[in-house]
Image (tube, rainbow, N blue to C red):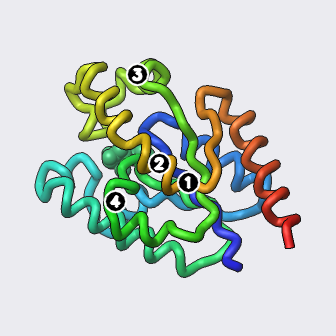
Amino acid sequence: MNNNIFLIGFMGSGKSTVGNILSEKLGYSFVDTDAIVEKDGEMSICKMFEQHGEKYFREREYEALKKVMKKKNQIISTGGGIVTYEKSRELLEGQEVYYISVDSETVYHRLHADSTRPLLKNSSFEKMSELLSMRKKLYEDTGTFEIDGRQAPQQVAEEIIFNIKEVRKKP
Ligand code: S3P
């Protein structure tokens, strides 16, 4: 068993914040596929989308996921669109994947002033809601557990820890 915990969910669901809390509480290392893509690609995600397009980014994201999965005992926060790429979804199959769910109002409230996410740049509330609802089923199908991400990050992390303990109790 690799003991890796994956976090999936839409932009603004709190994956990084929750992931950092989990990493501290469980003594696991924290990794973020977005950070790996940026480091390995030597450019920001915004620039990558601009210069090479989304498909290129998805492939780099898949490579980042594959790379981190070689190590153990990690909290792995993934980019919000990782579930849209079939190869990445296949990698996540059979892993312990927590889906942090949010509604569009929460995302809007948290991210309306954000300029680092290419897919939300100049996006209206309606467009963002549409993207979220298009992905909902993919998150549900890919996640092994769904946690309500509208709660405070500390609470989300506690629920995940409770689940992890339950899963590990099972023979
Ligand atoms: C994306 C989400 C971002 C990042 C990229 C694309 C998406 O990650 O990977 O901007 O398609 O939802 P976060 O979910 O960490 O914001």
Measure the C-alpha gap from mark 3 to mark 1: 23 Å
Q: To which residue does mark 3 refer?
A: 108
Using residue 45 as the reference point, say whether residue 162 is left or right of it. Answer: right
Q: Nearer the viewer, mark 2 or mark 4?
A: 2
Q: Secondary structure at mark 1?
A: loop
Q: Indicate the quadrant where residue 33 lies.
A: bottom left
Q: Nearer the viewer, mark 2 or mark 3?
A: 2
Badges 4 and 3: C-beta atoms under 8 Å apart? no
Q: Indicate the quadrant where residue 100 lies.
A: top right
Q: To which residue does mark 4 refer?
A: 38
Badges 1 and 2: C-beta atoms under 8 Å apart? yes
Give the label on residue 143, or none: 1
Residue at x 55%, y 54% (from the top left corner): 143
Amino acid on which the number 4 mark rests in the picture: Glu
Q: Secondary structure at mark 3?
A: helix
Measure the C-alpha gap from mark 1 to mark 4: 25 Å
